[in-house]
Image (cartoon, rainbow, N blue to C red):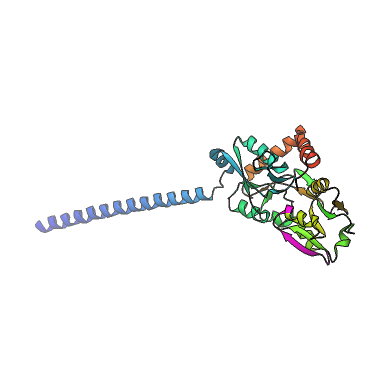
Amino acid sequence: MKKHFKITALLMVILLMATVLFGCAQKETSQNNQSQQQTNQQNNNSNQPVDTVEAIKKAGKLVVGTSADYPPFEFHDISSGKDVIAGFDIDLAEAIAKELGVELEIKDMSFDTIISAVLTKKVDMGIAGFTITEERKKSVNFSIPYIQGGQQIITYKGSGITGKDDLKGKTVGVQLGTTGEEIAKKIEGAKLKQFDKVDTAVLDLLNKKVDAVIVDFAVAKAYASQNSDKLELVGNLLDDAAKAVVLRKEDEKLLEVVNKVITDLKNSGELDKMVQKWFVEFKPKQ
């Protein structure tokens, strides 16, 4: 009888231990599953695209990268006694900031660093007379065009240059990282002199240290108008280039906002007024 009792007690102890162990195992499994679910949720959240529009509104400002050496697109205006960055692109940036309901912050930098600044999120977008090219489209998105343009040769009067074919053996000034630089590289026999800033290139042209400069038509026209006794535009446009805003590929909502602003400016006639203001009436100071 005692033996039977001992066996029964032993079985009950074993059963109790098994129940406890099973319960612990279930709890550990549940905890592991919960932890894995949290990890998966965190990973899913990290993979979600950031809503840049909301981030900009939360920050209260739109940060735009530009290169303020390219009148009339963007330049340093000191006419009021203060150094203010102004121009066609700045007016466009102001319109985008207004649509978002935020302040505008302009970051002035070298042209050839703007796309990198956009991609590394140092700025929200780049507005600096960017020409839409297939090469650039590999890394960034472009808005719809806000203005048509093209590269133009500007030279000093009496240079003997009448078009692209006359640039063989000549020294041609270009700005680093621009479409004008890429076009100049393809002109047989042309000697390139590269500049960080366009105004420095034009100054060299006025001093006849370069024979010609290749820049956007609007910029060339502005400088030629200001120096009509010394400079002139020659030849046809070297390309047919549309200008657009540069954005990161993932910022699709922000792209929609920019495209809406450009479309509204066109439909309202405000874009035509901006063109008149900056490309007809404006004269850059040299």
Is residue 53 visible in this depiction of the protein?
Answer: no
Residue found at x 74% / y 46%: 71
The one of 35 and 78 positioned closer to us in this rendering: 78
Q: Is residue 283 left or right of residue 2?
A: right
Image x and y of residue 282, in percent: 78, 41
Span highlighted in magenta in the image: 187-199
Residue found at x 26% / y 55%: 18
Is residue 257 shown above or below 42? above
Q: Is residue 255 left or right of residue 16?
A: right
In magenta segment, residue 158: no
Residue lying farthest left?
2
Is residue 285 visible in this depiction of the protein?
Answer: yes
Q: Quadrant of the N terminus?
A: bottom left
The one of 105 and 242 positioned closer to us in this rendering: 105
State the image quarter where residue 196 is shown. Answer: bottom right
The one of 52 and 187 positioned closer to us in this rendering: 187
